[in-house]
Image: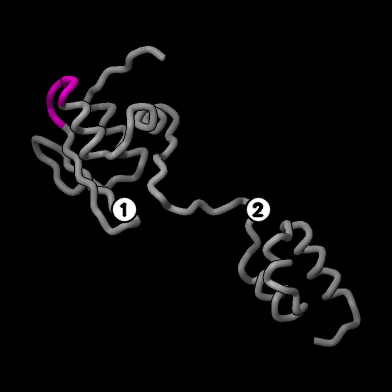
Amino acid sequence: MSEQPHTPANHDRFCRNEGWIGVRTGTHITYELGLPDGRVLRTRISDREEYGPDLWRHILRDQLEVDEPTFWACVNEEEKPDRGIAKARPDALPVDLVHLLLTRLGLPERTVATMTRKEAIARIDAYWESDTPA
């Protein structure tokens, strides 16, 4: 991987890609990011052309709380850092479907938890098509 420049433009792109909120403008733009643990990270974009190595390490470690590969993945591929926020699974069952499987069909939670979306829909479809009264 070629050395990429440690510039305010890349710093700003990281903040925008991750969804930091701009709280102050002027000579320097200041961004904040609320974390799941209640802390708020704060970083300021400099007006210089490039950051020196010591300042760059400080920004990554103390302000952004990421390592260099994570920073560049966010800048270049818009891959947000793992901040401990649970990601929704694309195969997760809708909560209404889970409720029906548990209450209407009386399935055990353990069974529902292991079902794929396709299996869950097939089970509820079979229930609605049957002559079983509610």
Task: Report the residue marked by disc 2.
Answer: 91
Give the magenta-colored segment's residue range.
46-54
Q: Are marks 1 and 2 in contact (CB under 8 Å)?
A: no
In the depicted structure, whether residue 99 falls above or below residue 6: below
Please say whether residue 59 is one of the residues in the magenta stretch: no
Q: Which SS class for mark 2?
A: loop
Residue found at the very far bottom of the displayed protein? 133
5 displayed left or right of 93:
left
Which picture quadrant has residue 126?
bottom right
Q: Residues within 10 Å of mark 1 (few under 14, many from 20)?
A: few
Location of residue 120 with respect to 133 vertically, above or below: above
Return the x and y of residue 6 as percentages of the image width and height: 25, 22
Disc assigned to residue 69: none
Which residue occupies the extreme top position in the image? 2
Please identify the dominant SS of the magenta region: loop
Q: Which residue is mark 1?
A: 35
The answer to whether 47 appears left or right of 17 in the picture is left
